Amino acid sequence: MRRFIRDVLLPCLVAIVLAFVIQAVVAKPYEIPTDSMVPTIQGNDRVIANRLIYRFRGIERGDIIVFSPPPSAVQTCSPAPGVPFVKRVIGLPGDVVSVNNGVTRVNGKPFVVSGALTPEYNMTFPRVPKGDLLVLGDNRPGSCDSHQWISTPPNPAVDPFVPQKNVIGQAEIIYWPLSRIRFLN
């Protein structure tokens, strides 16, 4: 019996504990339920989010992040409770983002994301406040993102921004389906 505990039971328990710790602190898998990040990430792809990276470096424009949706997103998109969003960071604190004639601009300069679908809307967002981010899906015409979360006229209680404290981590790799395994960013 001691040999069974030492050789089988104990290693299984250690593996289970390590799996929980790794998911809680280091990396966590997520299923992408929508096509908001097409063509970069397809609906039903599964990604691993790096939960440690932003402890070592700041969030950068172009990062694909996993985050808890802010109230404006919940009101607009009606996501399933507890399901995080995955979008690309376009605006950092202090940035002014605009979309005109299919071109996304940050502080007046074009910001091109290879493969992103051309937006079918025109808008200028308010300046991104300190501590917040502006995010868009790569499927610009079909993503429930900052461009849909904004209210007209602007209402501070319903804004298009994601608080940085809502960021869970950076989407690092597509691991499922096997035919799409690859690193992101």
Image (cartoon, rainbow, N blue to C red):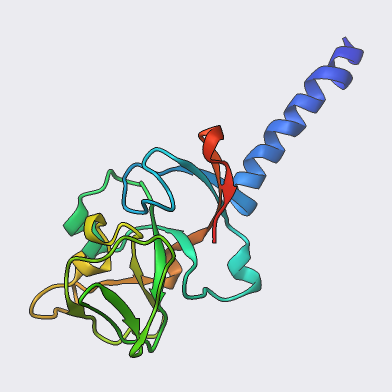
The image position of residue 101, as x and y in percent, is: 20, 76
Residue lying farthest to the right in this orientation: 3
Residue lying farthest to the left in this orientation: 153
Q: So how many labels did they put on this image?
A: 0
Image vertical order of residue 151 relative to residue 143, above or below: below
Image vertical order of residue 127 relative to residue 91, above or below: below
Q: Is residue 77 left or right of residue 46?
A: left
Q: Nearer the viewer, residue 164 or 87?
A: 87
- Quadrant assignment for the N terminus: top right
Specify the quadrant of the image occupied by residue 106.
bottom left
* Residue depicted at 17% across the width and 70% down the height: 121
The image position of residue 16, as x and y in percent, is: 68, 32
Specify the quadrant of the image occupied by residue 17.
top right
* Residue depicted at 23% across the width and 55% down the height: 142
* Residue depicted at 35% across the width and 47% down the height: 82
* Residue depicted at 13% across the width and 80% down the height: 154
Q: Is residue 29 left or right of residue 11?
A: left
The image position of residue 144, as x and y in percent, is: 24, 57
Residue lying farthest to the top in this orientation: 1
The image position of residue 36, as x and y in percent, is: 31, 52
Q: Nearer the viewer, residue 159 or 89?
A: 89
Q: Nearer the viewer, residue 102 or 20?
A: 102
- Quadrant assignment for the C terminus: bottom right
